[in-house]
Image: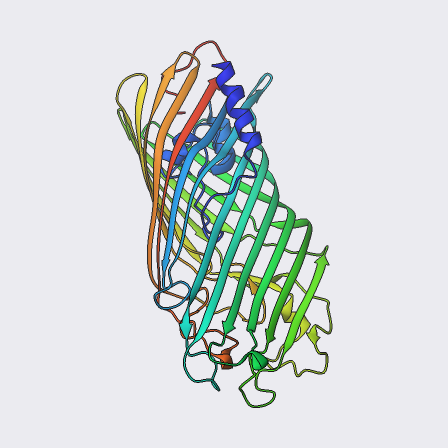
Amino acid sequence: MKNIALLLLSLFLLCINNPILAQDNHYWSQQFGARSALMGGAVVGSVRDNSAVYYNPAAVSMIEFPSISVTANVYKYDIFSMRNGAGRGINLNSERLSLFPQLISGVRSFKNNNVLKWGYALLTRHQANLFIDQRHETFYDVMSGLSGLEEFIGIFQYRSSMNELWGGLTLSWRPKKNWAIGVTQFFTYRNQNYINLAERTCIPANITQSTYFVATANNNASVLINHFGMVWKLGIAYDSPHWKAGVTVTSPSVTIYGSGKVDREISSNFVGTYLSPNTAPNFTATAEQSNNHLTFKSPLSVAFGLEYTHKKTHVSFALEYFNSMTGYRIISSDKSAFFRPSTLNESILGQNWNATEFLSVTTQAIEVWNFAIGIEQGLSEKVNLLLGFRTDRDAYGRRNSDPRTISLAPTAWDLFHASAGVSFKKGRDVVTLGVNFAFSESKSNRQFISYSDPKDTRLLLGIADNTADISNQAYNLIVGFTRFLQKENPNNSKE
């Protein structure tokens, strides 16, 4: 069993940069600890294993037997589709198979002190990855001054990957048998990459060689973010033979250091060849900057949990509220001129552009309520059945972002998770196996881009609307291993 623990630890350390298909706008996509994850994360009031470092630091002092735990999502298969995502009849799809870690954690006692305990955890708090490639090639009547159809080629590439690690230390105090308080100090690191590439080409068919031209237009942006921060979580826990309860408050994040890089370009060449002068002149709007004053925020949240126990049956419930965050700039620009030629009116794209908006990266968050329910049923002295369900509401909301800035969350959908598994006890070890299924169906979303009926008057684009329908399914296998740091594993332990 020792070799298994070392193998899982190695797996965690090797895989911390492996992204998965998910949205950054979901606070409950990840759950931690095999038992807690398979119970849907409904353990704020009932957690009595090492995942208490995250779920409720007060419960750390209620853990009777010190242990070390490692949990990994061994396989995760994601299927994402967006009908009409790049225009009417132009669908976007992505499928990915991933391997990634969840949590490594432990709890220890202070020597000669039964009311104080400490714990530690390294966890993958957020991971998100969406990779989309689409090439749309057909014939449209694009050029206003030409009869017949022109060949149109539209290329769309979208890459959004993010990995956020939290490392935490917990101190928990149990002044009375039924009550405890605790706090966890988390240090966070976030790495995020974003690429959005939209390239269009229009090739006229019925013109002579002497007047032949190719019209092109591009909208390309890339963002790199690195952020170090701090978060605190305060918890209170109550314990009785039949009821357990807990309340936690998680602070907004505080920035220690952040850096980022932004590149962006919008260009047009020969698009206005058959339009009136200055309607669509040749131009390039391009700029790049590196910024060492990046800001990233996570919201204040408050959670409540409750568990009822009857014989071998445990029924748990959890509810968590996440505060809203007014739209803010993760990266602010300090550039000036960015149009070429420099004499071009910066309102040419239908907006009053300036470099402050052109290179700014923005985000926002609405209020979110998530709830979870979990069941643990003892099948024998050494085998437990685990079931869970949870919501995972989108935090971005369907508010239109400023098109002059770069938004890292262009669309939104809610997720729902169902999970099931079993835990096996043998000696000092507990092995937990289970599966989690996540699903989402969302109608009338904003299209990423529109390549339907492109026109020269719109820089070779169609008109994006809210007719995109999203379908997202994810299947993952969860494996957990716990080693109790004593000679015998108590039968009433829950990991």
Q: Is residue 221 left or right of residue 396?
A: right
Q: Is residue 448 left or right of residue 295?
A: left
* Numbered label tally: 0
The vertical placement of 144 against 175, above or below, is: below
Which of 155/380 is in front?
155
In this rendered view, identify the residue nearer to me: 304 or 100.
100
Which of these two is toward me, 75 or 146?
146
Q: Report x, y in % for residue 252.
A: 57, 51
Identify which residue is drawn at 49% across, 48% down. Answer: 129
Judge whether residue 402 can be spotted in this image: yes
Name the quadrant containing residue 421. top left
Q: Which residue is at the far top?
A: 487
Question: Compared with residue 117, is residue 78 higher up or lower down, i.e. above or below?
Answer: below
Q: Is 350 in front, or is 268?
A: 268
- Residue 349 shows in the view: no
The quarter of the picture where residue 48 lies is: top left
Residue 404 is situated, as x and y percent measured from the top left of the image, at 58, 71
Give coordinates of residue 39: x percent, y percent: 35, 35
* Rendered residue at 40%/31% (across/down): 478
**Residue 400 vs residue 244: left or right?**
right
Residue lying furthest front: 209
101 in relation to 275, above or below = above
- Look at the image and tell me in which quarter the C terminus lies: top left
Residue 311 placement (x, y as % from top left): 26, 24
Colour theme: rainbow
Q: Residue at x 64, y 77 (%)?
A: 283
Residue at x 66%, y 83% (from the top left corner): 345
